[in-house]
Image: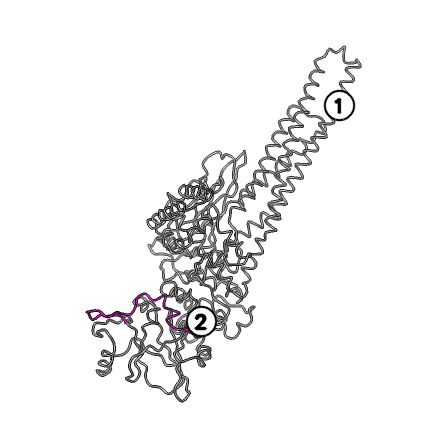
């Protein structure tokens, strides 16, 4: 079943999360109409390869044209044409952006499908769902709309005051122009009374409008404090969680709309105050409320505008190397990385071009030895993007870091922290003037890890995960001086996210329990058990030359590069202890096997099968783990199909019959076989085939079937050569290391 069909079968709660993924950048109409084709393309690679992205973009347009030509509904055909034109405008000059958008959508879909299979959601995901409750958004929409309506009504009130004042001013000047002899007449006294009534009315209206402005400004202040600022912080927290594989449940567009409408209301009030100032120049009087209250109102409006605009300057896309789009916040020296900042407030005309400057490691904590500078151009002008509703943004695509050298020509030596524990930051600064208000903008990225070798990537990613899991602080560069502990319920959720992000399917409860037992011993039953940073990333597993995260990361790499189809079919049990493995297999039919990851090798997968002797004895056999070197030569599904065992001179056979619990091997793996068994031809064909020798044993323990096999005796060689339809002399072992 296609991924999109699985999505459509989800419950409403999860479909609402899917709805957040699709907007004008990638309309759901296209996802629906081209579902199978979209899922068959490699968007992850296209997102980092401009020429491939351009080809994919042209193919997408061709596919859309094909679907449009076959559409019978005129309205649907028209809509498809409009969407096609919009995509051409957006992505023709930068197709990698389109590839990243589609890649992100597909990855989020997989994560949502994975979460649907979980028996219960983790604490982080639950908190994120609460933070995007529909009621909160509706309340904000209504409140912003009410404020906007109140400000527009004040426009009419100011205009009414201006009309009253013009009438009063005309009558007053007319009265002053009369002869002094007429001033004591009854008509003159009546006119003076009318003027006094008009002045009283004008005074009432001025007091009323100032009071209304005060109420609106207070309402905007409360809106910003109680809802907009928390909503902005929630978005930043969601961005943190999304960076380490979690869900990004809301887009930035809704927040941008709220902030822009609020800023427009404040600018509107500011113009109304300016208008009232003009009216005072023409007509004023003792106890006039405008001169008394206007300065305070102006200061409050400027203060709110300043802080609203300043807070709306955000890092939309955290720094990331295009070569590792799913591992942001890790930068390798000498390798280009990208980042994007955005101003979420739509501004009136700015007095000049808004230039943004990047600064690396501004205000480093004391004791930091390694220092870096940006090698490439670090200043760019913000542009208005078509799809951002007029808001300004700037995309830095070619930044590059270089480590500073000291006078003696050597680089800085290591400090107390390891390279991957040193945190750095990228700051962004800008300054502009709008409607007489000068605003200094400053924001910074989440903490970065800077590496000089790709071998440091796993350790760097562990640091990125640990930081963004455990703190909301945007810039605590001294975090690893005393890193906090993580509860197992938190950590297990993030570990599952790594598998859903990198391997397409998260971990179930049983798999997470096994991981917990490996990391914590028997404490895993208590979700509140806390794990130290050192135990997770630095300490070696008991009896092993590697640590827990290094072991788990090597499995992720193995799945991503060699086991993805098998993993996504849910055929790999993966994380299961040898004791549980025997318990599961002992009562199963002969030849039943299961697949699990090696606990003794980095990045290894093995299979164990069960045999029953005539006397009822149960035997378990485990093959030596297959690592990336072996799997590079032969796909894992083909290994399962062709695997042979030589046992005490018996004719070689494939002992693997049923995938646990009872699925026939070919039924499970048939669709995944890359090549079919050799057919009879006039030629002697050769192929690669995995072979193990199973030595005689009497114990029920699980002997390792060695692969590759040691040299055979001449008799074994002749026997095997007679039984197989290819020439052994022509074989080359794919397993030599």
Q: Which mark is residue 643?
A: none
Q: Secondary structure at mark 1?
A: helix
Q: Position of residue 419 (x, y in %)?
A: 41, 60
Residue designated by label 2: 575
**Label 2 neighbour load within 10 Å: few <14, some 14-19, many 20+:** many
Please tell me how many numbered marks the rendered image carries.
Answer: 2
Q: Is residue 66 left or right of residue 24?
A: left
The single residue placed furthest to the left in the displayed view is 682
For marks 2 and 1, the one nearer the N-term is: 1
The relative height of residue 275 versus residue 358 in the rendered view (above or below) is above
Q: Position of residue 515 (x, y in %)?
A: 47, 70
In depth, the one of 708 and 171 nearer the eye is 708
Q: Which residues are magenta?
A: 659-688
Residue 406 shows in the view: no
Residue designated by label 1: 196
User: Which of the 4 quarters of the picture holds residue 122?
Assistant: bottom right
Residue 456 shows in the view: yes
């Amino acid at each position: 079943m296609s991924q999109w069909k699985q999505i459509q079968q989800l419950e409403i709660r999860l479909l609402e999360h899917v709805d957040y993924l699709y907007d004008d950048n990638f309309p759901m109409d296209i996802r629906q109409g081209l579902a199978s084709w979209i899922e068959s393309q490699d968007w992850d690679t296209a997102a980092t390869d401009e020429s491939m992205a351009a080809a994919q973009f042209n193919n997408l347009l061709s596919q859309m044209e094909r679907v449009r030509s076959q559409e019978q509904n005129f309205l649907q055909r028209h809509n498809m044409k409009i969407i096609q034109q919009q995509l051409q405008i957006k992505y023709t000059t930068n197709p990698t952006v389109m590839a990243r958008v589609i890649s992100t959508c597909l990855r989020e879909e997989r994560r949502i499908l994975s979460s649907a299979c979980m028996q219960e959601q983790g604490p982080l995901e639950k908190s994120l769902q609460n933070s995007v409750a529909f009621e909160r958004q509706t309340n904000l929409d209504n409140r912003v709309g009410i404020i906007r309506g109140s400000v527009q009504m004040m426009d009419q009130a100011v205009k009414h005051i201006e009309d009253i004042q013009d009438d009063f001013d005309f009558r007053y000047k007319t009265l002053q122009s009369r002869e002094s002899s007429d001033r004591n007449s009854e008509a003159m006294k009546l006119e003076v009374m009318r003027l006094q009534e008009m002045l009283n009315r004008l005074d009432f209206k001025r007091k009323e409008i100032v009071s209304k402005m005060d109420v609106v400004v207070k309402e905007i202040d409360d809106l910003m404090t109680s809802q907009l600022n928390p909503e902005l912080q929630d978005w930043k927290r969601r961005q943190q969680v999304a960076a380490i594989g979690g869900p990004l449940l809301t887009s930035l567009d809704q927040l941008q709309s709220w902030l822009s409408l609020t800023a427009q209301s404040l600018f509107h009030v500011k113009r109304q105050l300016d208008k009232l100032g003009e009216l005072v120049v023409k007509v004023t009087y003792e106890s006039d409320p405008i001169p008394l209250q206007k300065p305070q109102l102006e200061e409050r409006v400027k203060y709110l505008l300043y802080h609203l605009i300043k807070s709306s300057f955000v890092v939309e896309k955290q720094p990331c190397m295009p070569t590792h789009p799913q591992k942001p916040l890790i930068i390798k020296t000498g390798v280009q990385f990208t980042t994007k900042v955005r101003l979420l407030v739509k501004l009136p005309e700015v007095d000049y071009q808004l230039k943004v400057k990047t600064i690396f490691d501004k205000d480093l904590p004391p004791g930091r030895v390694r220092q870096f500078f940006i090698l490439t151009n670090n200043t760019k002008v913000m542009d208005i993007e078509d799809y951002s509703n007029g808001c300004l943004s700037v995309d830095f695509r070619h930044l590059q870091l270089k480590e500073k050298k000291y006078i003696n020509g050597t680089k800085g030596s290591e400090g107390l922290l390891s390279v991957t524990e040193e945190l750095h930051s990228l700051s962004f600064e800008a300054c502009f003037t709008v409607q007489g208000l000068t605003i200094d903008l400053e924001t910074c990225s989440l903490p970065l890890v800077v590496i000089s070798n790709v071998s440091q990537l796993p350790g760097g990613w562990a640091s990125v995960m640990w930081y963004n899991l455990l703190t909301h602080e945007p810039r605590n560069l001294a975090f690893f001086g005393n890193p906090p502990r993580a509860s197992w319920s938190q950590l297990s959720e993030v570990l599952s996210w790594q598998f859903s992000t990198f391997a397409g399917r998260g971990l179930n409860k049983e798999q997470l329990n096994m991981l917990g037992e490996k990391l914590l011993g028997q404490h895993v039953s208590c979700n509140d058990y806390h794990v130290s940073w050192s135990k997770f990333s630095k300490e070696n597993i008991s009896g092993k030359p590697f640590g827990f995260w290094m072991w788990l990361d090597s499995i992720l790499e193995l799945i991503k590069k060699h086991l993805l189809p098998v993993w996504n079919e849910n055929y790999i049990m993966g994380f299961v202890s040898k004791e549980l493995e025997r318990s599961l297999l002992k009562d199963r039919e002969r030849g039943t096997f299961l697949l699990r990851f090696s606990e003794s090798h980095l990045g290894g997968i093995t299979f164990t099968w069960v045999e029953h002797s005539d006397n009822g004895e149960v035997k378990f056999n485990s093959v030596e783990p297959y690592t990336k070197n072996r799997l590079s030569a032969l796909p894992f599904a083909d290994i399962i199909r062709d695997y042979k065992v030589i046992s005490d001179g018996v004719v070689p056979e494939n002992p693997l019959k049923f995938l646990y619990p009872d699925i026939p091997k070919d039924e499970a793996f048939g669709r995944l076989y890359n090549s079919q068994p050799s057919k009879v031809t006039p030629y002697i064909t050769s192929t690669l085939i995995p072979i193990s020798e199973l030595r005689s044993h009497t114990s029920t323990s699980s002997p390792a079937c060695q692969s590759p096999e040691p040299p055979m005796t001449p008799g074994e060689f002749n026997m095997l050569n007679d039984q197989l339809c290819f020439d052994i002399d022509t074989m080359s072992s794919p397993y030599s290391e």
